[in-house]
Amino acid sequence: MKLIEYTVQKLAMMAGISTRTLRYYDEIGILKPARINSSGYRIYGVNEVDRLQQILFYRELGVSLESIRDIVADPYFEEVKALKEHREKLLEKKQHLDRILANVDKTIAVKEGRTTMSDEEKFAGFKQKLIDDNEKKYGKEVREKYGNEAIEKSNSKLKKMNQTQYDEITKLGEMVLETLQAAVLTGDPAGELAQKAADLHRQWLSFYWDSYTKEAHAGVAQMYIDDDRFKAYYDKNQPGAAEFLRDAVFIYTGISNILR
Amino acid sequence: MKLIEYTVQKLAMMAGISTRTLRYYDEIGILKPARINSSGYRIYGVNEVDRLQQILFYRELGVSLESIRDIVADPYFEEVKALKEHREKLLEKKQHLDRILANVDKTIAVKEGRTTMSDEEKFAGFKQKLIDDNEKKYGKEVREKYGNEAIEKSNSKLKKMNQTQYDEITKLGEMVLETLQAAVLTGDPAGELAQKAADLHRQWLSFYWDSYTKEAHAGVAQMYIDDDRFKAYYDKNQPGAAEFLRDAVFIYTGISNILR
DNA sequence: ATTGACATTGACGTAACGTAAAGGTATATA
DNA sequence: TATATACCTTTACGTTACGTCAATGTCAAT
């Protein structure tokens, strides 16, 4: 069995990256060479090839190099599990592209006079970060407002979150919006769809909160009505959506009219 | 008809970007506000909404802001045509994701012991830029070596190339490689597949050259054999691929043995 | 010995913003 | 009218992930 080794140019060319990138990766400790030969050259082996592959998968998914380093250097890093997560995330990325493609198609239809489109709709597919950004910005304010101690601990939990979990939140946030939109059309906040939206909303919030309580959930939902920033956001696509979500959550939690 | 206007936060929130991004886009001239009100606030209108949408489509495709500015600011910019190009490029991006997904799937199979994979294969999907990078690096050298005057003009043509055309080259380069690999298996440089590879190769080169000549084409193919950089690159996946491509091109051009 | 390809380190620069400070403006409320 | 809050501005510094270049050492072929 011949031991295959690569210098920087060979590995870079094989992987489709620059030699500069390999040196940078050595420098920041994300991909160290197997050894340094007597001339001072970096020599990479099969283990480094496999790690570079993983790095490139994560990079493709937009993960920062710092995060990638923390992930792949973990002694408990499980390669196959990571690969399966890559797979999921890549499929989500494809769905994201589909949403943008749908946007392009609709925009073409608009320009050709076949249909119309709100200014909001023109940015469909570009806003997935918005909902969780809102929670990041206002979540603390909610907790201060409603004085729930369990929720106060959410900052430490948020910091432990890696990119994969972050993406999970993104997906959940989208599902909340989509389900909510469909549920509003039913007009029934106690109905199956509305209760599903409320449950998804709970799941989404649970990423930020160390522990979940129905009171806090209901409090957040009420804030959507009381606070024009949230109300405007949810109502932009569908008038009444914020109020509907509030009603659905009240029914879901069994808590209503207490917070007014 | 009420005239809709947006300040930075409203437009940014709607588009899923930051207010900082909008100010930056104003600064670099890619998206100027419709007007500045008496307080000095940026006010955007429907035209700016549409332009921002186009900017975000291009950004999604990885086009630099400088290029985007040149494209959208062109008086002859055709919106619908651009949208249709976005569509094509997005579909290609999906195909790129499919290649990476296939790579992930195969890598999982390897780790689970179901199949094997070369080091080269481990980077499938990450190398689309490599071939045209090679031409960029060595193309001028070829022209100096063979003294073809028509080819000397390729620098000016290359500079006029926009991102869409650049991506077109990428796609063609891939097709050359794929077709070449299949053709080598036939063992017949005069066969249909081999001649297709030679033709794709010609198309790819034609992006760089103002005018095509058979002599220059044959010269490049011969260089693949004479120059270890090219030979090593093409032979890495399949031993003999560089020589096979040389033979196929000689037959395609009807020029052989002249350049030796 | 010479030449060309490949390696090293060190260093500067860049694209595309994120973040923060200082200060002005708009709006609602007491 | 005063105050508080949200929003706006400009200025300026910092960050991430490299690209580019210079100076110099190493390897292999002639």
Image (spheres, coloured by chain):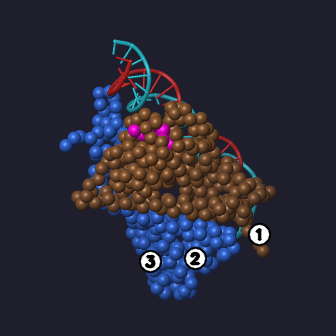
Chain colours: A brown, B blue, C red, D cyan
Q: Nearer the viewer, residue D9 or C10?
A: D9
Mark 3 or 2 closer to N-term?
Answer: 3
Which is closer to the viewer, label 2 or label 1? 1
- Distance, label 2 to label 1, CA atoms, is 26 Å
Disc 2 marks which amino acid?
Ala
Disc 1 marks which amino acid?
Leu
For mark 3, what is the residue?
B199
- Distance, label 3 to label 1, CA atoms, is 39 Å
Task: Give the percent coordinates (x, y) of residue B215.
Answer: 46, 76
User: Magenta region: which residues?
Assistant: A217-225
Q: Is residue A252 above or below residue B205?
A: above
Few, some or many residues within 10 Å of mark 1 (<14, 14–19, 20+):
few
For mark 2, what is the residue?
B242
For mark 1, what is the residue?
A3
Disc 1, SS: loop
| Residue B27 visible from this viewpoint | no
Residue A22 counted in the magenta span: no
The residue sitting at the left extreme is: B1
Overall secondary structure of the magenta section: helix
Residue at x 53%, y 61% (from the top left corner): A90
